[in-house]
Image: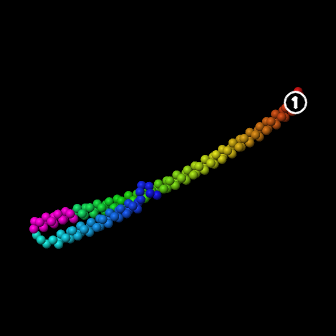
Amino acid sequence: MAIGGDPDDLRRLATRLRTRADTLSTRATSMDNHLDEVHWSSNAASSYRARLRDDVSAVEDVVVRLDELAADFDDLANTLEERQRLVGLLLDAGIETAREAAEAVADGVHDGVQAVENVLKDMGAKGKELLEDLGGALSDALPLI
């Protein structure tokens, strides 16, 4: 069930973010190592090192944020998957409840028809009994007339 999206898509996105973070981390390490390899001294060299340190720091901040986002997407995927599971269970329960209600209605209708049939049979029996009593009363009364 894909209500709200596909958790696997979110996990793939988290993996891509982590891969990108790893790539950037490797580059930041390379840039940082490059600082140690710069052997000239001048104002330009000092400015270059300062700018490179700022860039390394900025890249490291991005790496941390990408890892956090990847974790957020994994959490979202897990939450979505759990919600989809619960929705599936609720839908299944709803379908089962509707089936049971339909059966109860059908049973109720059957019981109602049976009750009407029983009432009609009783009415027929009572009517027959009344007719017999009436016939008996008439036959008793006819000789008197």
The residue at which mark 1 appears reads as 142
Quarter of the image for residue 56 reads bottom left
The colour style of the image is rainbow
The residue closer to the viewer here, 5 or 140, is 5
Q: Amino acid at mark 1?
A: Leu
Quarter of the image for residue 67 reads bottom left
Farthest top residue?
Answer: 145
Q: Is residue 78 visible in this depiction of the protein?
A: no
Q: Label the magenta part by its dominant secondary structure.
A: helix
Q: Is residue 8 above or below residue 97?
A: below
Q: Position of residue 88 (x, y in %)?
A: 48, 56
Q: Residue at x 64, y 46 (%)?
A: 109
Quarter of the image for residue 58 reads bottom left
Q: Position of residue 26 (x, y in %)?
A: 26, 69
Q: Residue at x 18, y 69 (%)?
A: 35
Does the magenta portion include 33? no
The residue closer to the viewer here, 73 or 13, is 13
Q: Residue at x 79, y 38 (%)?
A: 129
Q: Is residue 37 visible in this depiction of the protein?
A: yes
Q: Secondary structure at mark 1?
A: helix
Does the magenta portion include 55? yes
Q: Is residue 90 left or right of residue 113?
A: left
Q: Is residue 72 left or right of residue 2?
A: left
Q: Which range is magenta?
A: 42-56
Q: Position of residue 61 (x, y in %)?
A: 25, 61
